[in-house]
Image: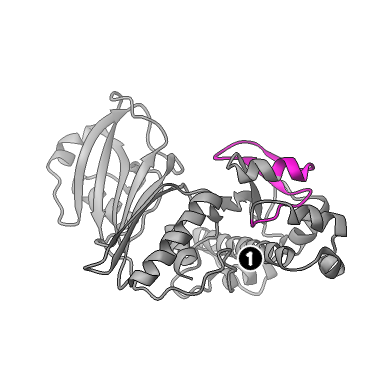
């Protein structure tokens, strides 16, 4: 699918490739570790290794099983990444003797509980873009400033869709009954990819809606959009480029309960002030749906997946954003932090188109 960018600048011609030197990820823990307990907490740095590969290497070296090692999230392979893992402290002597050229134990402490999936606040990123000309430096800084002000779409990244980018098609075929997959984990992965594809498609349509609303008179587009002239005029008065609709499912940001909105002016202002955000559907059972005007734009992306559904932030606000331009090397380096489950590659995509 072609994803709509919300920033309107033209493509910026730079060189970006994920590598251990140009792409660094540092996990931000959800909570402070207690310093005592039966679980050993290791802060590890890995290079050019997927998280699963690193866990396999560590488990074989200390003599435990893969499932005995706790971790909060999977980190990129083509990068230098820092993350926390837990292992029972009975393996501490072997952990202390552990050595591997691609894995370094930076710190260790203790905690009462095993680290589980999702036990992280977010991730900090360092990214280096190369072959950046001075004229492009200005465009990048301007785009970065707009992201700092308005945030960015929370698309799923290419990593979600497999090496060939077509896992979602297998998920769609599974649901249609035209494909059989016995492996339960593989089946779930394909269906999750299809859920992600539907989410990205919906988000792209909603960004397109905002562009249409800001480009035409209300009377010209009312019939096409299926919205009243009065509603479109309300959308046009919203400060944020992502236009929120009556019945959208909102969440307080960065966490909170889900609720359907009614007061567009009030809720759009709180969205603009980073207090709450609209959410998109991960289609499935046991989830909350949009209503009213928002449902008109969501209903075509509602599919029966036989998996539990969920809501995902449609929009996020990167924090701690900074950049530095090294003209002699034509490098543009940036730092930022994202909530968990968000993709740094999507921020780069929004920057350079």
Q: Is residue 322 magenta?
A: no
- Say how many tags the image has: 1
Q: Circle 1 sits on which residue?
A: 204
Q: In which quarter of the image is residue 91?
A: top left
270 sits left or right of 291 in the view: left
Extent of the magenta region: 241-267
At mark 1, the secondary structure is helix
**Of residues 281 and 292, the one drawn nearer to the viewer in this rendering:** 292
Residue 190 showing in the rendered view = yes
* x, y percent for residue 98: 15, 46
**Of residues 75 and 207, the one drawn nearer to the viewer in this rendering:** 207
Residue at 31% x, 42% y is: 85
Above or below, comparing residue 141 to residue 166 in the picture: above
**Of residues 291 and 348, the one drawn nearer to the viewer in this rendering:** 348
Residue 303 showing in the rendered view = no
Instruction: Bin the neighbour count of mark 1 within 10 Å (Cα to Cα): few under 14, some 14-19, many 20 and up.
Output: some
């Amino acid at each position: 699918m072609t994803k709509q960018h919300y920033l309107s600048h033209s493509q910026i011609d730079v060189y970006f490739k994920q590598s251990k030197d140009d792409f660094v990820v540092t996990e931000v823990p959800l909570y402070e570790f207690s310093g005592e307990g039966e679980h050993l907490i290791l802060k590890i740095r890995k290079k050019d290794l997927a998280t699963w590969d690193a866990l396999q290497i560590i488990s074989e070296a200390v003599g435990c099983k893969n499932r005995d090692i706790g971790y909060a999230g999977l980190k990129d392979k083509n990068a230098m990444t820092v993350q926390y893992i837990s292992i029972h402290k009975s393996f501490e002597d072997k952990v202390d003797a552990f050595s591997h050229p691609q894995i370094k134990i930076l710190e260790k402490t203790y905690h009462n509980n095993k680290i589980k999936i999702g036990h992280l606040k977010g991730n900090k990123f360092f990214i280096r873009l190369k072959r950046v000309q001075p004229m492009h430096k200005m465009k990048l800084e301007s785009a970065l400033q707009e992201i700092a002000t308005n945030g960015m779409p929370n698309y799923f990244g290419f990593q979600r869709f497999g090496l060939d980018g077509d896992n979602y098609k297998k998920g769609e075929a599974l649901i249609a009954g035209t494909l059989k997959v016995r492996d339960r984990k593989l089946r779930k992965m394909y269906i999750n990819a299809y859920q992600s594809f539907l989410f990205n498609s919906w988000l792209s349509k909603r960004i397109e809606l905002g562009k249409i609303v800001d480009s035409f008179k209300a009377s010209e587009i009312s019939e096409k959009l299926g919205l009243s002239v009065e509603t479109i005029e309300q959308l046009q008065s919203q400060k944020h480029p992502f236009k929120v609709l009556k019945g959208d499912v909102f969440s307080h940001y960065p966490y909170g309960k889900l609720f359907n909105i009614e007061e567009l002016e009030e809720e759009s202002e709180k969205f603009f002030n980073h207090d709450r955000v609209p959410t998109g559907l991960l289609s499935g059972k046991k989830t909350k749906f949009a209503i009213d005007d928002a449902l008109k734009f969501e209903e075509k992306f509602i599919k029966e997946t036989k998996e539990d559904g969920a809501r995902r932030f449609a929009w996020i606000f990167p924090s701690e954003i900074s950049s530095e331009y090294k003209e002699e090397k034509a490098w543009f380096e940036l730092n930022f932090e994202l909530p968990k489950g968000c993709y740094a590659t999507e921020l780069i995509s929004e920057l350079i188109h």
